[in-house]
Image (spheres, rainbow, N blue to C red):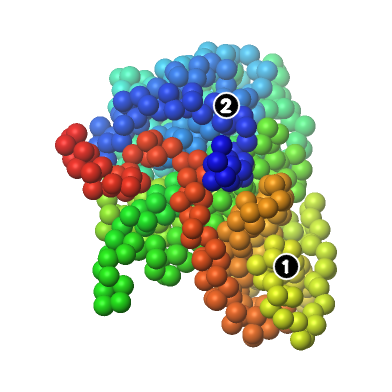
Amino acid sequence: MDAEKSVQEHLRTLVHDHSYHRIQPRLAQIFSSGILTPRPGATGADRHQLTYARLRHLTESVDARTPLLGRRDLLFPLLEWAAIADPSLFYAFFLHHCTVVGAIREFGKDQDGLEDVLADLGSTSVVGALLMTELGHGNSNAAVRTVASYDHDRREFTINTPVPEAVKYPPSVAADGIPRLGIVTARLMVGRQDCGIFCFAVPLRDTTGPRPGVRIEPHDSSPLLPLDWAAVSFDHVRIPYTHWLRDSAAISDDGTFTDPLSTPAMRSRQASRLIRYVWEGAAVGLAAITRASAAIAVRHAHVRHTNGTFAGFAPDMPVIRYRNQQRTLFGALASAYVAAMAARVIASPEPLGGTAGGIRTLFTLKAVIDQIAERVTAAGRAATGVLGFSPSNRLLEYQGLAHSFNAAGLSTQVLYLNAAWTMALGLDYEPPADDTPGRNPTATAAEWDLADPALWATLIGARERRLHQELTGELGKARENGLNEFDAWNDRFELAERTAQAHAQRLLVDIVRTATDGLPDGPTRQLAQRLCALHFLSDIHDHSGWYLTEGLLTADDIRRIPGLLNQLCDDIAPHALDLADALDVPYDVVGAPIAHADYVSAYTQAFAAR
């Protein structure tokens, strides 16, 4: 193995572990099927049918009778490749195998009567959907108005939509001819007793159409992420007792409801346990399309030639030589590696979330990976010029998936505010230690190296600590002045969001330092650290005014950052293609003509194949 291959192999360990590479040939075989050949012209009902045909293909290829949630070493690579191959397929796949099967495993564990439901889902003879959010309350999973009333005489439940605001929106269940099962959140009423929000497994439609009492109204979805969106309402739909995913609750033979959770509010909060499957799946898929977008754009920039506006002194050269392209694309490459390392932590054999801190880390990483995905997919599309808008090159689809997950599983902003709230309360949280180094005013640039991982880790940690102090201090003063909790927080949401974003960057710093420190000491580690410095120095530069005000950086430091970013680009440029390929992107699955060195011929062949 030559030196360059050795570097690539070491860099790949930042993205995937050895178990991934063992199943990579199997993934390649599964995704080589003609049904997964990119079809950018497919629209409408044909596109939806293609999505579910692809879902059946993937499911049959891995024998999902044993739920994939218990096979994390296979589930997450499948999610990665599905996101890269077809974002709509990814959405359907993760809803079916993660959230729907996850709800049954989470809340219906060891319940009798669900075996046939799981068998149908495992064979995709029935496709699952999640019906949590309602038209009248957007992203809120707590203000559920759909009602499940217990019928003691028949030992059944009736699911009902009492008001227009309770319509479930927007589950993707409108495609004809496909049997569907929904995990529906509803407020359980036993007599007049409000028992809180539970999940119910509700058959929605069979091959002939919606089931009795189920109304499904098709709606348009975004062309960037084509799904069979619908509004769904229920008119006293009966389901058996066994389809109540009751968790630890029960209703006795005499109709008495019991639940170890003492209040409806506590029970209602338990439904949010399901969202962790959304966060895991979303983070892994978003990191995958981030890698694909960065790799495609970097490869294309090396073969896309331009005479440009400055043709007089820059005739016919690849656009990657331009500094603005380097800053954009190498920055995207750096962020793709950062997102990949974070996703690898989430996809580890043991899931995050055993503690309040673990749950916060999981949803904070989901939020920051989504922000990275939105930024990188947009940058990749913009940097490839007019070809970035071609559906064949996938970048618009990837950008659509990133945008969709800004809202899915609670919006990114809400996740940050939730993180700030738990941090302010000190729930399994300690701010970073005050290890801001003293600085000799006469220190030279070499003595104060902003590209040193230890230094930018210290700076980002100091930002989190001081913002947390500011947030808790202001909240304390507001309460002393007699403000209620809403008013105390209402004027401090911006500060809270900045605090949580700083926490997210500090989490990323810790992940990246641990991962890169695990590389062999030498050029590979240095290259990885120089690359990641682009991501973190850009974040520091974005907040340079704050660092200057806090006395953590001087004006001269801030003036040096643009030049340092340019130097980092010079260091990365000779290795850019190796760095792109080490992101482990299956280019054949992407199917983008611009990912090829001879992209003109790739386009010509694609046209001829239609």
Which label sits on residue 22? 2
Q: Quadrant of residue 343?
A: top right
Q: Residues within 10 Å of mark 2 (few under 14, many from 20)?
A: few
Q: Residue at x 35, y 24 (%)?
A: 33
Q: Is residue 531 visible?
A: yes
Please determine whether, in this image, residue 365 is positioned above or below residue 308.
above
Side of 428 where 605 appears, left or right: left
Side of 44 where 404 appears, left or right: right
Helix, strand or loop under label 1: helix
Q: Quadrant of residue 383?
A: bottom left
Side of 435 where 451 appears, left or right: left
Q: Nearer the viewer, residue 126 or 501?
A: 501
Q: Residue at x 43, y 37 (%)?
A: 586
Please determine whether, in this image, residue 206 is positioned above or below residue 542.
above
Amino acid, disc 2: Arg
Q: Give how far across and how far down residue 347 sits, in percent.
A: 62, 38
Helix, strand or loop under label 2: helix
Q: Nearer the viewer, residue 588 or 362?
A: 588
Q: Nearer the viewer, residue 184 or 323?
A: 323
Please determine whether, in this image, residue 441 is positioned above or below residue 51.
below
Q: Residue at x 51, y 29 (%)?
A: 24
Q: Residue at x 66, y 22 (%)?
A: 109
Which label sits on residue 455? 1
Side of 447 where 53 appears, left or right: left
Residues under labels 1 and 2: Cα distance? 37 Å
Which image quarter is the N terminus in? top right
Q: Nearer the viewer, residue 492 or 495?
A: 495
Q: Residues within 10 Å of mark 1 (few under 14, many from 20)?
A: some
